[in-house]
Amino acid sequence: GAGVSQTPSNKVTEKGKYVELRCDPISGHTALYWYRQSLGQGPEFLIYFQGTGAADDSGLPNDRFFAVRPEGSVSTLKIQRTERGDSAVYLCASSSDIRVKTEAFFGQGTRLTVV
Amino acid sequence: KQEVTQIPAALSVPEGENLVLNCSFTDSAIYNLQWFRQDPGKGLTSLLLIQSSQREQTSGRLNASLDKSSGRSTLYIAASQPGDSATYLCAVQGGNYQLIWGAGTKLIIKP
């Protein structure tokens, strides 16, 4: 596609439920990042992938969060037993190669609200 | 630990004025610095990327400078327009490839 696509754009879920957030990166981009942005703050790093593998997952807040990228393209961020504190905008970005100093392109984000 | 600070947090100026947004970072060992624009309810749009070896980048009415040694970057916007109203974020990329972000400057251009 022309840009990074994230679905859904909005998600409202009840506390304790499981959610999946999807990211379609720019075609051919090997690096993919997930960030989380709370209201009034800058994004915070969660995880990045180089190809299919998670090169750095140090930003995942706890073991309720997990992300996959099985074929090196689409990625899914999975959150188990959601809590109200998980409410935020989840942003996905891709770049051509994280080992090269290239810019990252962001999707429009998924706004997650846990009620 | 890298920390990025943006000042001011909010800025309101009349249309047509030139303005400067500031970004500072604590660790000068960066690969690059990016300025982004974020509109309400929308994603992030990359405006300018400055590599660590560069001093500035220009795109249209925007000019971004980088002084690695002092840990500072500025985004200069010339002849501001109401359409420039948005939140502007800067982010630095270090050796672990993560982007570390400031909290942003919310800019309002008054017609």
Image (cartoon, rainbow, N blue to C red):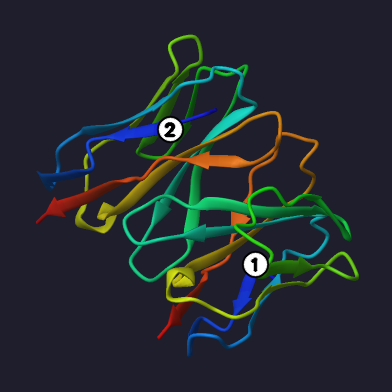
Which chain's residue wears label 1? Answer: A
Relative horizontal placement of residue B46, taking residue B94 as reference (left or right): left
Residue under the point 35% across and 39% down:
B61
**Is A42 drawn above or below residue A62 in the view shown?**
above
Residue at label 2? B4
Residue under the point 70% across and 29% down:
B95
Residue at label 1? A4
Residue under the point 64% across and 43% down:
A103
Residue under the point 18% across and 52% down:
B108
Tell me whether marks 2 and 1 sit on the same chain.
Answer: no
**Tag 1: amino acid:** Val
Which chain's residue wears label 2? Answer: B
Q: x and y percent of residue A62 in the render?
A: 63, 61
Q: Look at the numbered disc 2 and give the secondary structure of its residue.
A: strand
Relative horizontal placement of residue B100, taking residue A103 as reference (left or right): left
Along the viewing direction, whichever of B93 and B39 lies nearer the viewer: B93
Along the viewing direction, whichever of B25 and B35 lies nearer the viewer: B25
Q: x and y percent of residue A32 in the render?
A: 73, 57
Given this view, does label 2 or label 1 mark the residue nearer the observer?
Answer: 2
